[in-house]
Image: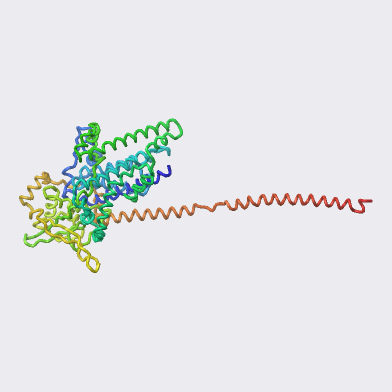
Amino acid sequence: MGETRLPRHMFLWSMAIIYMFAFASLYVQIPGLYGNEGVLPVRLVEPRVDGSRPVLEQIHAHPSLLWLGPRLGLDLDAQQAMELLCLAGALLALGAALLEPLRDSLVFFCLWALYLSLCQVGQDFLRFQWDSLLLEAGFLTVLVAPLNLLRWRSAFRQHDAVTFWLVRWLLFRLTFGSGVAKLASHCPSWWGLTAVKHMFEAQGIPLPWSWFIQQLPDWYLKLGTVGLLVTEIAVPALYFAPIRHLRLAAFYIQVCVVTPAAAKHEHICVSYPRCVCVRGCLWKLWGLVQWAVIVSAAVAVFAISVVPYSSMEQVYSSKILPEVRQAYSLVERYRLVSAYSLDSRVDGRSEVVFEGSMDKNTWTEIEFMYKPGNVGVAPPVVAPHQPRLDWQMSQAAQGLADQSPWFTSLVHCLLQGNKDVVRLIQTDSAQYPFSQAPPVYLRASLYRYWFTQTAQDWSGPKEWWRRDYSEEFYPAVQLGDPTLEGMLNQHGLKETFPIQPSPDSPLAQALKQVRGHVQTLPDHLVLWSLLATVATIWLFKTLLSGVLGGRKAKPTPAEPKAKKAKAQPAAKNASASSLKAGRETSEESRRDADKSPKKRK
């Protein structure tokens, strides 16, 4: 059991850290994305409480905790309710990351329920593949984590091998599905082995070292394309190899932190005898019931996870059992399983560039903090923050404006000068050209972007990007423009009722104070501060445990005992020798006495 404990702890700790950053990153963006005057106000899609329907029925229809606020007596608006869920999730995940007893199945279930509640009302900004991946991995974490808070005996949880096979299966679907989707897309870049050459500049938000990787020789980048395809298509099969070293090699190739640990787990059949190898008939029966429940859940998750992938090919879709498809439809809203096809096409990079004007003659470009815009600005490092508006802007550039309803709402918010939305674009007012007054006119153009090439003297780049104008993405509009008003009405973004004033309850006031302190820093610095805080606490705990452990450690008295043990036999030998010597002396004295003249007479 000692061999399987470490991988499980590493997986649970990693999931707690991921949850913490996910909640914190979303929290700093809520006012601009989902506020009362945000891009997609959550109050327009907030589930309403229906007193005539049972609670469980409403939860099944709208699996979100937001509508439970009125039932619990919480006087909060929709934005504040989202902020409360994010803060609760971030604090709970922080506690799980720092305290091992909180890495519990119930805690991870609460984290999963909180994030699912946010995704249910998050609309386009919470429909990325990493959100689906976090929800699926989070649900598996509920099965993997022990039930420490209700455990009264150490033999309570003996099914790690079963649940970790689900983790392997998820990793296999993620990597293998991504590799197959690359070839199935018939993208010339993948079949011509030039995808890696363009992949780094086509990332959602490129990194600074992406430019340097782009400068590597073509033969090296083609070799990297081959290695990537082999890693994603051939290597995942080794996750289920019967030889442990092959599984370790496969996991270390894919992910060097979390997934290699899962390879240390043993086969599923090993978990059965372990769950009954405890003392007492009742405990054996309880272990057997627990094993049966977990195995049933594992089989069910495995079965329904095949359904999303069968939709890719109609031939395989018809072979899915109707019962399995029906089970998938029942749990689809909970996003327990998903299909993943990351980076299937590499078609270069397109970016939408906003321009504002006060007179419709002189236009000024509006630069975003994170996505490419100014060709002379280096790509930033924002991880672990996820700027969702910048990511959506990159996704919108791959289609048309009418395919992204939120884009029209963004244009409307910028024309109104909404400060929370402007803060998503630039937190520094000096970098936003319309900080004093919002633009009267706004338009958007589509540009093609490429990384620049290395200079002949191999010096650093003066310009990181080069770009060419492609076409108009959004026409020039102003407030009250028929085109703008028509698109707002078409997408249901036009206000049909006045905004209600924010509640003034103590909880609402506390949330406002927290928001006021957080807004003093840029979003990515908030996440970096959280990362530094967690690292500092971990370092302090490590040093403190080392100091306390050193104080508790006492020198072992093995050596004195040994010396004492050696001294005792020596003393015994010495006394025996003295007695023997005394006897010999007395005998010699008697002999001398017999030989004396007086004795002879």
Looking at the image, the residue that sits furthest to the right is 601
Residue 183 at least partly seen: yes
Q: How are the residues colored? A: rainbow
* Quadrant where the N terminus is found in the figure: top left
Is residue 551 positioned above or below 301 on the image?
A: below
Q: Give the residue drawn at x 42%, y 31%.
A: 282
| Viewer-nearest residue: 531 or 281 | 281
Residue 241 lies, in percent from the top left, at: 35, 42
Which residue is at a point 30% across and 54% down the rendered structure image?
530
Q: Can you tell which quarter of the image residue 209 is in? A: bottom left
Taking 557 as reference, is 386 left or right? Answer: left
Please state which of residues 324 and 198 is positioned toward the viewer in this rendering.
198
x, y percent for residue 90: 29, 48
Q: How many marks?
A: 0
Extreme residue in the bottom direction = 457
Corner quadrant of residue 207:
bottom left
- Residue at figure coordinates x 28%, y 48% from the top left: 232
181 with respect to 259 (left or right): left
Residue 513 is at least partly visible in this image: no
Q: Position of residue 451 (x, y in %)?
A: 20, 60
| Left or right: residue 286 compared with residue 32 | right
Determine which quarter of the picture holds residue 153: top left
Q: Residue at x 33, y 44 (%)?
A: 239
- Between 449 and 553, the residue placed more toward the observer is 449
Residue 235: percent from the left, percent from the top? 31, 47
